[in-house]
Image (cartoon, grey):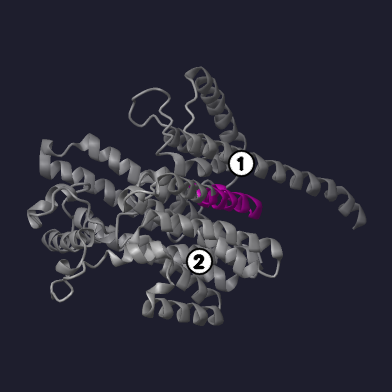
Amino acid sequence: MSKSLTVNEPQINAQSHDDIKLYFLFFAMISVLVFILAKEISLPRVVTIPIAVIGVFAFIYTSFAKPHISLLILTAYAPFSRVITGQFGTQIVGLNLTNIMIIFIFIGWAFYASMNERELFTRASISPWILAFCVWGLFAVLRARVVYGEAYDMDSFFILFKRWATPILLYFLGLNIVRDRESFKKVLFVIMFVTFMISLMAIRDYMNVGTGSLESSRVGGVFEQPNILGAFFVYNMFFFLGFFLYYWHSFKYWLLLIPFLAAFRGIMVTFSRGAYLAFAFGEFMTTFFRSKALFIVSSIILISVILNPAFLPEGIQYRLSQTFSRGQVISTNVEDVTDSSAGKRMLIWQGAIQMIKDEPLFGFGYGVFPFLIGSYVPQIKEMDAHNTYLILAAEMGMPALVMFLIILMLVIKNSWWLLRHVEDKYFKAFALGVLGGMFGLLVANMFGSRLNSEEVSSYFWLLSGLVMRAVIMKKNNQIV
């Protein structure tokens, strides 16, 4: 026994040392990336081209030798893919850093799995539904071309469809590449650290522009759209709260309140009413799943805020007060008493419901909603549905909506199963963070299309894969 300990101790220390170096590497990489974006530094091509070439070859090698590290790099990059597209100086459609990374990670993982006699694709209950959802979406694109002919610019809509479908691949990457506790922790660390850094960027942006009108003061951050930025925070910020609630006895975990509050401030400076409501519901459900006492306290606070909105921060009060137009509250028509933004949403939703009634099975075709809504609501021209559930049903039919809802419910169900059956506090905190984000997601997507681009939806799909991997690890006794 003592001999075994003597042999293994250096290996354990070496592994721990390697982990520290890897964490530091990603900390430095993400920090440099954020600094370049925040300072709007434009590097000359003589610098960027050699770095890009070396980086691509290094990434390819890593994808074959250590695919989990390549996944970490993609995880760190994904939310920034809109502002740093990585086109390599070309205008070739599809030749961007995100696609290149995903392709080589898949190829590298296939090679790594075959060389190490590992299972290439892991079975999970949610996977068939995700595949069916993707196939149905592709069918919606092809059917629209048949129905509308040349009027349906298939190339443009297929690009939009690709941006919608590409993040789903991260579910399969997370499920199949992350196989142990240490890899799991590294991926979640990157997600949480990126979320924190993006919140700091949002706060900084508001300090620079937050002195004009409300609309000009709204911060869009790396997503260049305030509502999407707010949704991103809601999806990912509850991990900070989850780990705090499970490890609050340790002082160092109190530090997690800093990124949690930074993300909350990030939501505030988006002035997104949908994000405000989504955060409130996500926080409410996080306490519900953690303990009855916390839930009761949270309920009291929520009721107090509803009865006396003066408890809310001034910026949130002001934004919510704009929902209703003063001087018109005696009207019985809801559209009359809401501001123009909220009023348009209600009109669009009415039109979307009528569209669903007209084409309930197959919908009108992927991407066509903005061009057809005017036929149902003449005063609305080329606008999004501002509701993920309605636009899915209107464009792709009710089966697509049902599949999407089943996927969401399976993620919630498996997260809840993990929370109840696992004893490891780390995975309990992870499951709690997923549940908070998922219930926030359910609300956020009632007020907008908040999963239709790879920058904001990548983490949702990756985390869904991690949930299923954690469940498998528990069932295989890899975690207690």
What residue is shown with label 1? 26
Camera sees residue 68: yes
Residue 415: mark in rendering: 2
Residue 165: % across, % down? 35, 46
Q: Which SS does the magenta portion mostly show?
A: helix
Quick one: label 1, few (<14), some, or many (20+) residues within 10 Å? some
Viewer-side residue, 334 vs 120: 334
Q: Is residue 194 magenta?
A: yes
Q: Is there CB contact under 8 Å for labels 1 and 2?
A: no
Indicate yes or no whether the magenta region holds residue 181.
yes
Identify residue type, mark 2. Answer: Ser
Q: CA distance from mark 1 to mark 2?
A: 27 Å
Quarter occupied by residue 274: bottom left
Residue 188 is situated, as x and y percent measured from the top left of the image, at: 57, 53
In the rendering, at what x and y percent does residue 298 appear? 49, 77
Which residue is painted at 84% across and 46% down in the image? 10
Residue 424 seen from this side? no
Query: Residue at the right extreme?
Result: 2
Which image quadrant for residue 154?
Answer: top left
- Which residue does the image show at 27% across and 59% down from the upper left? 387
Q: Which quadrant holds residue 454?
A: top left
Quadrant (top left, top right, bottom left, bottom right) of the C terminus? bottom right
Q: In this view of the protein, which residue sits in the foreground, 317 or 290?
A: 317
Q: Which residues are magenta?
A: 173-196
Circle 1: element type: helix
Element marked by disc 2: helix
Q: Is residue 374 above or below residue 277?
A: above
Rendered view: 120 above or below 101: below
1 or 2: tag closer to the N-terminus = 1
Residue drawn 43% across and 54% down?
232
Looking at numbered disc 1 in the image, what kind of residue is underneath it? Phe
The quadrant of the picture occupied by the N terminus is bottom right
